[in-house]
Amino acid sequence: MFNLSSGEIVVLLIIGLVVLGPEKLPDAMRKFGRVYNEIRRVAGGIQRDVTSTFSEPVNEIRKTADEAKRIFTGLDPTQEHPKQPTTSDPDDPPFVPYEAPPATDPTNAPDNGAAQ
């Protein structure tokens, strides 16, 4: 929680010993330990409550996203690769991609009266 190194802890203990004295330091350390453990326990409880509260809606959103992905991509969530397209039905017309009309050949172009 505080991310203190051992050297920093020693410095804090020496400061505490100087400020509180040897009689009060052990009692102050026990009280600090109890407060620290209580804060960690409360924070852990809050984290568990938040996780359990949001886990169900997050799982529902995840299911919906997986279903949409399966529908739009043809990907089965349990498979790693999309389904391969099946052979086309003989009754289906063949797919013909759009092709631009052929360019007119200038040698076959009609003469617009240029040479009369």
Image (tube, rainbow, N blue to C red):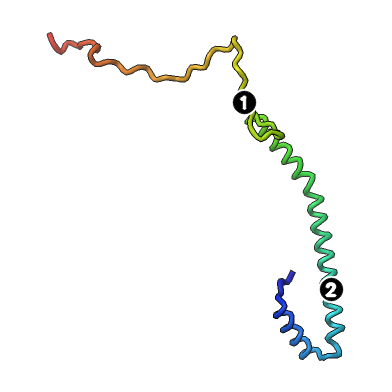
Residue 85, how many percent across, how many down?
Answer: 61, 23
- The residue most toward the left is 116
Chain-order first, disc 1 or disc 2: 2
* Residue under the image location 73 percent in, 72 percent down: 2
Does 104 sit above or below residue 31? above
Residue 25 falls in image quadrant? bottom right
Residue 36 falls in image quadrant? bottom right
Please state which amino acid type lies under the numbered disc 1: Gln
In what element is the residue under mark 1? Answer: loop
Residue 91, how many percent across, how many down?
Answer: 59, 9
Residue 8, how many percent across, how many down?
Answer: 70, 80
Q: Which residue is mark 2?
A: 35
Does 92 sit above or below residue 18? above
Please state which amino acid type lies under the numbered disc 2: Val
Question: How many other residues sit within 10 Å of disc 1, few (<14), some (14-19) or many (≥20)?
Answer: few
Q: Which residue is mark 1?
A: 84
Front position among marks 1 and 2? 1
Tell me the quarter of the image containing the C terminus. Answer: top left
Residue 1, how many percent across, how many down?
Answer: 74, 69
In this orientation, which residue lies closer to the viewer: 93 or 10?
A: 10
Lateral position of residue 30 relative to residue 11, left or right: right
* Residue under the image location 78 percent in, 88 percent down: 17
Marks 1 and 2, how far apart in space?
61 Å
* Residue under the image location 81 percent in, 50 percent down: 53
Q: Which mark is residue 26?
A: none
Lateral position of residue 15 relative to residue 38, left or right: left
* Residue under the image location 78 percent in, 49 percent down: 54
Does 19 sit above or below residue 81? below
